[in-house]
Amino acid sequence: MGDVIRVVHYINQFFAGIGGEEKADIKPEVRDGAVGPGNALKGAFKGQADVVKTIICGDSYFGENIEEAKKEILSIVEEIKPDLFVAGPAFNAGRYGVACATIADAVQNELGIPSVTGMYVENPGADMFKKSVYIIATGNSAAAMGKAVPLMAALGLKLAKGEEIGDPEAEGYMARGIRYNMFSDKRGAERAVDMLLKKLRGEEFVTEYPMPNFDRVDPNPAVKDLAHAKIALCTSGGIVPKGNPDHIESSSASKYGEYDITGVNDLTEETYETAHGGYDPVYANEDPDRVLPVDVMREFEKEGIIGSLHNKFYTTVGNGTAVASAKKFAAEYAKKLKADGVDAVIMTST
């Protein structure tokens, strides 16, 4: 390694200034020097490192061709032979986060080059790779760029120099589930009692073992009269009309689809398919009713078990999709379902 650490930076089409969703299918390309946020990264290195090359890849291209894209990018990085690989930051952009974490993981494991990335804690890329990749915890939008980049640069320099990495709180990265023995001047029981007393007094304290935060949703009351109820079908299994007309992504979906099934009694192989990239699509494509049971619901409708099947279904892909995106989708189409007088929803997965 020379005096100045050589860095390769990975970004998507948006941060490269190429375009938004309409350019998300571009294949990997290389540019000399820093591009977009790479200039801030270069400044944060303060002369200790230099961004020698920038790799740009469209989010959709990476998400829909993961193995091929990974192979292409690894080949580029291997040829450049940098001392450090930096991806992002991706903030709360789901597909971008998955791409950043996936390629950072591959670069460090397959090429042995230290890697770091950054994203929001709810980004699906964080859940998938925080145990294997150093991921700086960022805000949920690019407004947090000014805080994220210096932390990524500082951690990246330490990794490239082979220096000891501190704990997540000190360095700003997400906890990786790795435990170390640490010594304290107080026994565990005494520390626990101190925390308990602070909690009882309403004082601030820092737990030594933070627990995950899960949403709790109270179930609605049961439908009292199914025989007169309008029931809707929704799915995160990715069932779409043949050809996926709205181009719902196979992973880290940024949208959902609304499709009319008026007069449709059966989802056939010729008319429907799955866009989902997280499970083997063969059986779902052979008979999409296996994921979205329109055929059975039509039978229930004829037999009077339900009042009627709603004439629209809502669909997206749950594979790697950010929690924030899923909440947004549900909030939008729940309003539509209520406005259409739907009494209950059957939500299917894979």
Image (cartoon, grey):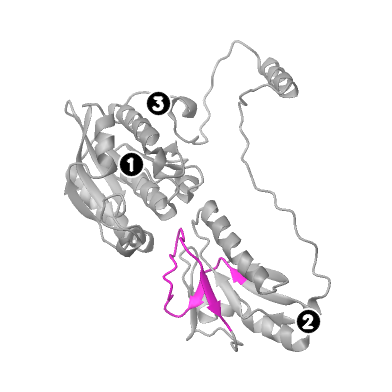
Instruction: Give the image quarter of residue 236.
Output: bottom right
Whether 293 is drawn above or below 197: the answer is below
- Proximity of marks 1 and 2: CB atoms separated by less than 8 Å: no
The residue at which mark 2 appears reads as: 305
Within 10 angstroms of label 3, few (less than 14), some, or many (20 or more) residues?
A: few
Q: Amino acid at mark 3?
A: Ile
Relative to 100, 274 lies left or right: right
Relative to 19, 346 lies left or right: right
* Magenta residues, start to end: 234-261
Residue 218: percent from left, percent from top: 74, 54
Secondary structure at badge 3 equals: loop
The residue at which mark 3 appears reads as: 165
Instruction: Give the image quarter of residue 8.
Output: top left
- Proximity of marks 1 and 3: CB atoms separated by less than 8 Å: no
Image depth: mark 3 or mark 2 in front = 2
Lower sequence index among marks 1 and 2: 1
